[in-house]
Every structure is written in C-alpha cells, then in structure tokens.
Amino acid sequence: MRAGGVFNGKVGETLTLTKTPLLLHARAILLTSLGSGPEVCRDHSEALGEAAVRHAMRLEASSVASLLGRFER
C-alpha cells in the first residue's frame, strides 16, 4: 500500500477497507497509523484509539478488535 501511495503510515492517517478477505469475517477494516520513529507517542495512540471507536460506532459495528503492530520499511 505504501508503494502505491494508498496508505503512507503518517501520524493520524486512516484507511477503511470495505472488501476484506473471507477469512476475517469482517464487514470492514480500519487501518490507523501512529507514524514511525520519534514521532510515535502515547498522545497519538490515545487519539487514534478514540477515533477508531467513533468510526466503529458510525458503522454500527457489533464487535471491534484491535491489533497493534510494528512494521519496518
């Protein structure tokens, strides 16, 4: 996704995927970015968590899961 410029991983960036792999049994996936390197901080993670919950509420989601990961370029 980064190579295609669709999702660059900058602080606060979000992307909603509405076509998901059948294995996930999910109606949508929301990707959020904390950024990388020195720009990552607790304030960003709290703000993105709140934004994700608001987004799930707008979608009227019956369940929500969170996965935090670190990906190197």
Image (cartoon, helix red, strand yellow):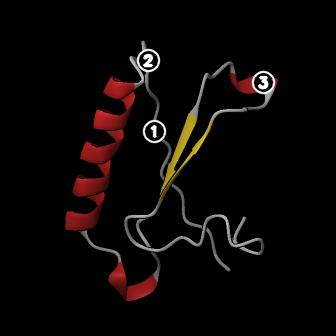
Q: Nearer the viewer, mark 1 or mark 2?
A: 2
Tell which circle, 3 or 1, labels the residue nearer the N-terminal end.
3
Residue underneath mark 3: 23
Residue 43, by quadrant, is bottom left
> Could you give the CA–CA distance between mark 1 and mark 2, rounded to whole angstroms?
10 Å
Screen quadrant of the C terminus: bottom right
Residue at image location 36% in from the left, 36% down from the top? 55
| Residue beneath disc 2 | 63
Please determine whether, in this image, residue 32 is positioned above or below residue 5. Answer: above
The residue beneath circle 1 is 66
The part of the image, by quadrant, that contains residue 71 is bottom right
Provide residue 31's location: percent of width, then percent of height. 53, 50
Q: In this view, does 30 lie to the left or right of 47?
A: right
Q: Is mark 3 on a helix, strand or loop?
A: helix
Q: Position of residue 27 (x, y in %)?
A: 61, 22
Q: Which of 13 and 66 is in front in this view?
A: 13
C-alpha gap between disc 2 and disc 3:
16 Å
32 in relation to 4, above or below: above
> Which element type, helix, strand or loop, lies under badge 2?
loop
| Residue 41 coordinates in the image, percent (x, y) | 27, 73
User: Residue 38 has which mark?
Assistant: none
At label 1, the amino acid type is: Ser
The percent position of residue 63, horizontal first and vertical second, equals: 44, 17
Q: How crowded is mark 3: few (under 14 residues within 10 Å), some or many (20 or more)?
A: few
At label 3, the amino acid type is Leu
Q: Which amino acid does label 2 sit on?
A: Ser
Residue with the most extreme left position: 43
Residue at screen point 43% across, 25% down? 64
Instruction: Using the numbered discs, state the Cα–Cα distance from disc 3 to disc 1 in whole angstroms.
Output: 16 Å
